[in-house]
Image: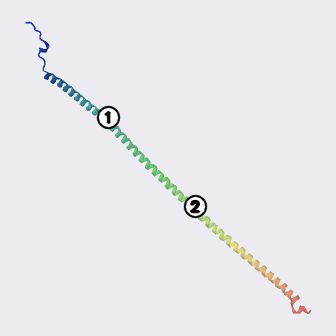
Amino acid sequence: MQPTSMPLSSVPAVPDQWAQFGIVGIVAFLFLVAVVYLFLRSDKREANHLVERLKVESARSDQEEKFAVEREGWKTERALIVADFERKLREAVEKQSIDLRSERESHAQMLRTEREANRQHEDLVRKEFTELMDRVSSQQSESADKLRDLLSRFYDRFISPGSRGG
């Protein structure tokens, strides 16, 4: 037997329906592979993103811890500065108070000394005034006596009844 050649159109062909199912199956399979690939890729990206975020949060928490330690150091330093300032202020106020007290005491002593000197001066002036008034009084009495003598001589000589006729 010899192979007979058959026309191509008469060769039993795969039914169109099977071909369509095969193509649809291949497309569905490729689509499924693409979805799985994308899912795995997004899963990997999400895992990488989560790892990065954890690193960032870890770094941030380390930095926040450093900042907290630094803030505590600043609080301590600030407390020391405030305590030192208050101590210096208290010392300055006490020194000023002592200085003012000694100044007031020296001023009071100066006023007492001045008042005593003024009293002594006033007593001296009164004594001198009394002596002056005594001298003035004695000189006044002398001058009054001299004036009386002069007037009595004037009277005796010019005004008296014996001096007119005589």
Q: Is residue 34 above or below residue 158?
A: above
Direction from residue 136 to residue 111 in the image, left or right: left
Tag 1's secondary structure? helix
- Tell me whether circle 1 and circle 2 mark residues in contact (CB < 8 Å): no
| Rendered residue at 26%/30% (across/down) | 41
- The image quadrant that residue 141 belongs to is bottom right
Residue at the outermost right position:
166
Q: Is residue 88 above or below residue 41?
A: below
Q: Quadrant of the N terminus?
A: top left
How crowded pointer 1 is (Cα within 10 Å; few <14, some 14-19, many 20+) is rated as few
Direction from residue 102 to residue 67 in the image, left or right: left
Instruction: Work out whether residue 156 or residue 99 is closer to the camera in this orientation and state it.
Output: 156
Which of disc 2 and disc 1 is earlier in sequence? 1
Amino acid at circle 2: Glu
Amino acid at circle 1: Glu
- Which residue is the site of mark 1? 52
Q: Position of residue 86 (x, y in %)?
A: 47, 53
Q: Is residue 44 above or below residue 103?
A: above
Q: Position of residue 106 (x, y in %)?
A: 59, 62
Q: Quadrant of the C terminus?
A: bottom right
| Rendered residue at 40%/45% (across/down) | 71
Q: Position of residue 103 (x, y in %)?
A: 58, 61
Residue at the outermost top position:
1
Tag 2's secondary structure? helix
Instruction: Work out whether residue 5 or residue 119 is closer to the camera in this orientation and state it.
Output: 5
Instruction: Work out whether residue 132 or residue 13 is closer to the camera in this orientation and state it.
Output: 13
Numbered label attached to residue 103: 2
